Image (spheres, grey):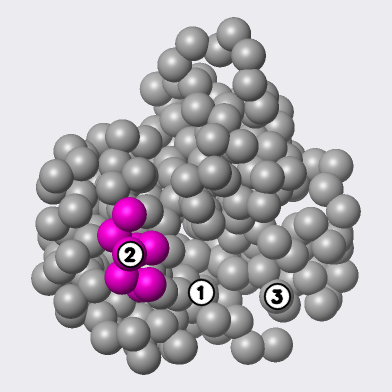
Amino acid sequence: MARKPLIAGNWKMNQNHLEAIALVQKIAFALPEKYYAKVDVAVLPPFTDIRSVQTLTDGDKLSLTYGAQDLSPHDSGAYTGDVSGPMLAKLGCSFVTVGHSERREYHGESDELVNKKVKAALKHGITPILCVGEKLEVREAGEHIAHTTTQLVEGLKGLKAEQVKDVVVAYEPVWAIGTGKVATPQDAEEVCGAIRATLAEKYGAEVASSVRVLYGGSAKANNISDLVACENIDGALVGGASLDGDEFTKLCALA
Ligand code: PEP
């Protein structure tokens, strides 16, 4: 089954709402509407920018989509500082990253919580981008595949096969994130292939062949082509390079 590539720009905690408007305008100007027939592109700004991004994309009827970087497992209530799935859905979010390594590391997010967040996103019609991947010491111990596929299985626990079809998985080796040390296409493909094999084993070949598996970790315009040429890599989750409009759109054009 042909999977449409997805390039998603994770802005992390960067760009105020005015900077967000400028960056989205730059992307919209550089990528002609016909481009989106071949590749899906999303930006994932901080919560405070989402309304501005929505106004631009709605107003100009852009095919550029957007989403958030996290969500609460709860729909509403006494959860100070959290933002819920219904709130993001109301703002037109198409995607939300769940279980990013920075959330796991700095906010102690467990696989159990990540699983609840995946379910919360799906419940509100938002595509979760489930982030999985190993730290350097895990890779050095040769346990990167077992570690990553365990995160995958735990993150998807309790979902029906038809729900798994609506999930995007991002393989993000932690040692490659923000370090400039991109995984080789061979290393990335080894794990992305294992992710797809695990999906096939648990949910069947049809589901496995329809789920998009992204690579993330120092992806840039100069390395994206070799990564997306791999059989099991369907695009990228891009951090640092998504903050530079020229670099990001060049990367998109090469994906
Ligand atoms: C990320 O934050 O998901 C990421 C892949 O970052 P970078 O591209 O900067 O490594």
Q: Measure the C-alpha gap from mark 2 to mark 3.
A: 31 Å
In the rendered image, residue 244 lying in the magenta stretch gets the answer no
User: Magenta span covers which residues?
Assistant: 55-62
User: Is 159 drawn above or below residue 5 in the view shown?
Assistant: above
In front: label 2 or label 1: 2
Q: Earlier in the sequence, mark 2 or mark 1?
A: 2
In the rendered image, residue 58 lying in the magenta stretch gets the answer yes
Task: Name the amino acid, label 2.
Answer: Gly
User: Is 186 drawn above or below residue 44 in the view shown?
Assistant: below
Q: Nearer the viewer, residue 32 or 198?
A: 32
> Taking 228 as reference, is 211 left or right?
right
Classify mark 3 as within 8 Å of ligand 1 or not, answering yes or no. no
> Taking 223 as reference, is 141 left or right?
right
Q: Which residue is mark 3?
A: 210
Among the 4 quarters of the image, the one containing residue 253: bottom left
Q: Quadrant of the N terminus?
A: bottom right
Q: Measure the C-alpha gap from mark 2 to mark 1.
A: 33 Å
Q: Which residue is mark 2?
A: 59
Q: Position of residue 77 (x, y in %)?
A: 63, 14
Q: Which residue is mark 1?
A: 233
Task: Name the amino acid, label 3.
Answer: Ser
Q: Quadrant of the C terminus?
A: bottom left
- Residues at discs 2 and 3 in contact (Cβ within 8 Å): no
The answer to whether residue 8 is visible is no
Q: Measure the C-alpha gap from mark 1 to mark 3.
A: 12 Å
Q: Nearer the viewer, residue 251 or 52?
A: 52
